[in-house]
């Protein structure tokens, strides 16, 4: 194994533990000097629900919390709606595609409700 890769891999575990042991922070309480790039974790107690990675951290978190979030920007709400409605398998075909699911009479309202709930993180 390449030595520099080994050092990188070995550095990941402590960072993982740092991430999962952080105190939760609501969007409106984010520190003013937030790093531009980073990982973020949505959790409910000890139940870790969603991990995201971005090159524009503050903006990405805001997108998750916007009431007008789309199926591309509010991906956490979209995934939860998939679980709640039984549409857990992603597809790249027109049938059950993301835009079609948002228009679905069961999935659409579930996704919109979850998007609105995410607003409370704001």
Image (spheres, rainbow, N blue to C red):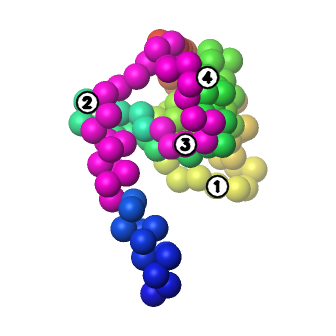
Q: Is residue 47 magenta?
A: no
Query: In the image, which disc is placed on residue 62?
Result: 4
Residue where numbered disc 3 is placed = 38
Answer whether labels 1 and 4 touch (C-beta < 8 Å).
Answer: no
Determine crowd level at label 4: few under 14, some 14-19, many 20+ residues with C-alpha closer than 10 A: some
Give the Cα distance between marks 3 and 1.
28 Å
Instruction: First in sequence, mark 3 or 4: give its number.
Output: 3
Q: Between marks 1 and 4, how big is the CA–CA gap? A: 27 Å
Task: Classify mark 1: residues with Cα within 10 Å, few (<14), some (14-19) or many (20+).
Answer: few
Residue at coordinates 62% horizontally, 18% vertically from top-left?
Answer: 66
Mark earlier in primary sequence (1, 2): 2
Which residue position holds label 1? 91
Disc number for residue 45: 2
Q: Nearer the viewer, residue 88 or 69?
A: 69
Residue 64: x and y in percent read: 58, 27
Disc 1 versus disc 4: nearer the observer: 4
What's drawn in magenta, residue-wise? 13-40
Q: Is residue 28 above or below residue 20?
A: above
Extreme residue toward the bottom, this view: 1
């Amino acid at each position: 194994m390449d030595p520099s890769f080994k050092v990188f891999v070995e550095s990941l575990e402590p960072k993982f533990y740092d991430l999962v042991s952080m105190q939760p922070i609501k969007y409106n309480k984010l520190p003013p000097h937030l790093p531009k790039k980073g990982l973020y974790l949505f959790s409910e107690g000890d139940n870790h629900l969603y991990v995201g990675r971005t090159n524009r951290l503050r903006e990405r978190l805001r997108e998750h919390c916007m009431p007008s979030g789309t199926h591309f920007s509010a991906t956490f709400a979209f995934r939860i709606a998939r679980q709640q409605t039984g549409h857990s398998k992603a597809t790249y075909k027109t049938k059950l595609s993301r835009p079609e699911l948002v228009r679905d009479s069961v999935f659409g309202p579930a996704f919109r409700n979850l998007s609105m709930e995410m607003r409370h993180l704001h």
